[in-house]
Image: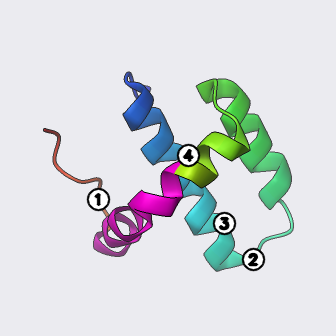
Amino acid sequence: MAPKTRDERLFGAACLKVTLERSQGSAMNEIYSATLTDLGLTAEEVDVYLQDARPKVEAALDAGRPPARG
């Protein structure tokens, strides 16, 4: 199921960005750009979101699961 709220979409995009940053894969731009288009977000929006939420995003990725809703 696709994320429904803007915050969920931002969180998902941020998780993808951090995962791709960690892997340094050559397909990063193509995958990331297509995902942002699908989510209706811009790279700038995700960058702003990550300024405050990076610790939450990295903790969720390190734990292997998304944070609890609420």
Give the quarter of the figure containing the N terminus: top left
Which numbered disc flags the more N-terminal residue, 1 or 2?
2
Residue that badge 3 annotates: 20
Q: Which residues are magenta?
A: 49-63
| Marks 1 and 4, how far apart at CA | 14 Å
Amino acid type shown at disc 2:
Gln
Query: Which secondary structure lies at badge 1?
Result: loop
Give the quarter of the figure containing the C terminus: top left
Question: Where's residue 21, x and y in %?
Answer: 67, 72
Few, some or many residues within 10 Å of mark 4 (<14, 14–19, 20+): many
Q: Are marks 1 and 3 in contact (CB under 8 Å)?
A: no
Q: Residue at x 44, y 26 (%)?
A: 2
Q: Residue at x 40, y 59 (%)?
A: 53
Q: Nearer the viewer, mark 1 or mark 4?
A: 4
Residue that badge 4 annotates: 13
| Marks 2 and 3, how far apart at CA | 6 Å
Residue that badge 1 annotates: 65
Asked whether the viewer can see residue 15, the reply is: no
Amino acid type shown at disc 3:
Leu
| Marks 2 and 4, how far apart at CA | 16 Å
Which numbered disc flags the more N-terminal residue, 1 or 4?
4
| Marks 3 and 4, how far apart at CA | 11 Å
Q: Is residue 44 above or below residue 42?
A: below
